[in-house]
Amino acid sequence: MKTYKNRKKKHISKLKRHYFRSKKNKKIQQKLSLKQNKKHIKYKISLLPIVLQKQIYIWTWRLYWRQYVPITAKIPSWQYRANHIQKQLWEARFKNIHFLHLPFNTLPENKKWIMGCQCDFCINDTKISYTDKHCHSLIQYRHPEYFPDKFMPAETISFWNEHLILKETTLIKNFDPLCGSYKENKITKRLRQGYPIQFNHDTLTII
């Protein structure tokens, strides 16, 4: 019983010490906060007349709302990536680069020569001989369905293998397998090479 009472007394004394220490710490913190508050802008504003305090309050909130942009008005995080991809797809049609050879589709070590593709890899490719490329172009010229049906693997069936695609009511050039070959259309070749063109009422002439 005595040991239990002694333990109880010791525990109560510890609690009292902790309580008084916390009180002292609070008083010290209050004193420090008072000293700091005198230097703080809030304390300085509180010394001003109430009319000026109200004016400062109004102007601070006006400036805040001028700089504030709601989340619904901000540009989505995915928009920059979407714009980049759209630009890549537009350049692919413009430069006649196949969809598989775009930087976000195939790794450089997995690329293979694609007929008509004007990317750096296909232009500088030496694994396939010039005569084989010549034969592929000749077959494609005679049979337009050769590239999408026979040349490309069955896993790559998509509108990117088609020469022309229908968009709403107009036909748009998508990918030309004969681009860069001796069988390429003369008009499209000269346009691709940057020759100036003139439009007449009846005919189209290329200088």
Image: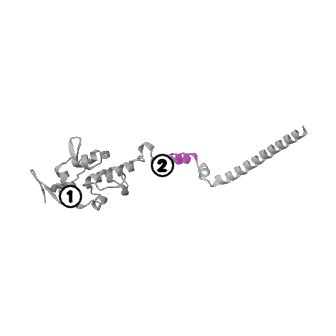
Q: Earlier in the sequence, mark 1 or mark 2?
A: 2
Structural distance between the alpha carbons of marks 1 and 2: 69 Å
Residue 18 lies, with reference to residue 113, above or below; the image says: above
- Badge 2 is on which residue? 63
Magenta stretch contains residue 52: yes
Question: Residues in magenta?
Answer: 49-59
Which is in the foreground here, disc 1 or disc 2? 1
Query: CB under 8 Å between callouts 1 and 2?
Result: no
Task: Inspect this view and state whether residue 113 appears.
Answer: yes
Foreground of the two, 25 or 111 = 111
Q: Quadrant of the C terminus?
A: bottom left
Magenta stretch contains residue 29: no
Foreground of the two, 19 or 24 = 19
Q: Residue at x 69, y 53 (%)?
A: 32
Q: Say which amino acid is labelled 1.
A: His
Q: Secondary structure at mark 2?
A: helix
Foreground of the two, 202 or 100 = 100
Residue 134 — which label? 1
Q: Residue at x 43, y 42 (%)?
A: 72
Q: Secondary structure at mark 1?
A: helix
Q: Quadrant of the N terminus?
A: top right
Left or right: 49, with 10 as reference point: left
Q: Residue at x 32, y 51 (%)?
A: 100
Q: Position of residue 81 (x, y in %)?
A: 39, 50
Single out the residue that lies furthest toward the left: 202
Left or right: 42, with 31 as reference point: left
Q: Say which amino acid is labelled 2.
A: Leu
